[in-house]
Image (cartoon, rainbow, N blue to C red):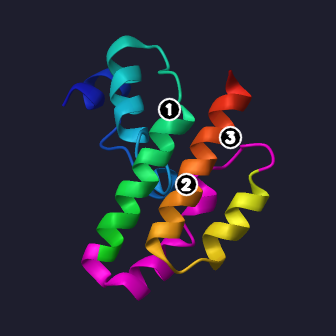
């Protein structure tokens, strides 16, 4: 009701903006409450989210389909990172979940160093 009274809207559609960006819901709530944008998640938080997404995908769909369906999400999670192409190529061609988790650790390590 607050949004309707304050902004004259009946609802807010988020849709594809949430793909690879699960933080958008928290960001919208924070902005609506305080009028200030939250800092974007750092690379370690993004990698944690991707790992959790991968694990849930495997639990739900099985190892083969879970890994395959995750491939389309890596680009969205890591959008805007410079020189991510090498890692993205590895992520979309690997089928072993343990190796995928290792590659994700490498991404976290590499881009944490870059940011420091």
Q: Looking at this view, is 11 or 16 the one in front?
A: 16
Residue 54 spot, x, y in % from top left: 40, 65
The crowd level at tag 3 (other Cα within 10 Å; few <14, some 14-19, many 20+) is few
Q: Quadrant of residue 10?
A: top left
Tell me what residue is drawn at x 47 percent, y 21 percent.
38
Mark 2 nearby-residue class (10 Å; few <14, some 14–19, many ≥20):
many
Label 1 vs label 2, nearer the camera: 2
Does the magenta portion include 62?
Answer: yes
**Residue 20 painted magenta:** no
Question: Mark 2 sits on what residue?
Answer: 104
Q: Which mark is residue 94?
A: none
Point out the stretch of residues depicted in magenta: 59-83
Q: Is residue 67 left or right of residue 62?
A: right
Residue of label 3:
110
What residue would you read off at disc 1? 41
**Is 20 placed above or below 81 here?**
below
- Classify mark 2: helix, strand or loop: helix
Which quadrant of the figure contains the N terminus?
top left
Q: Nearer the viewer, residue 24 or 87?
A: 87
């Amino acid at each position: 009701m607050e949004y309707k009274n304050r902004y004259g809207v009946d609802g807010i559609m988020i849709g594809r903006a949430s793909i690879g960006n699960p933080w958008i819901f928290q960001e919208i709530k924070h902005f609506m409450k305080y009028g200030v944008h939250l800092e974007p998640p750092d690379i370690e938080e993004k990698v944690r989210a991707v790992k959790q997404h991968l694990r849930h995908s495997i639990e739900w769909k099985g190892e083969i389909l879970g890994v395959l369906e995750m491939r389309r999400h890596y680009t969205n999670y890591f959008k805007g990172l410079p020189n991510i192409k090498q890692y993205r190529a590895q992520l979309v061609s690997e089928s072993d979940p343990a190796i995928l988790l290792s590659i994700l650790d490498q991404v976290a390590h590499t881009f944490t160093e870059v940011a420091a």
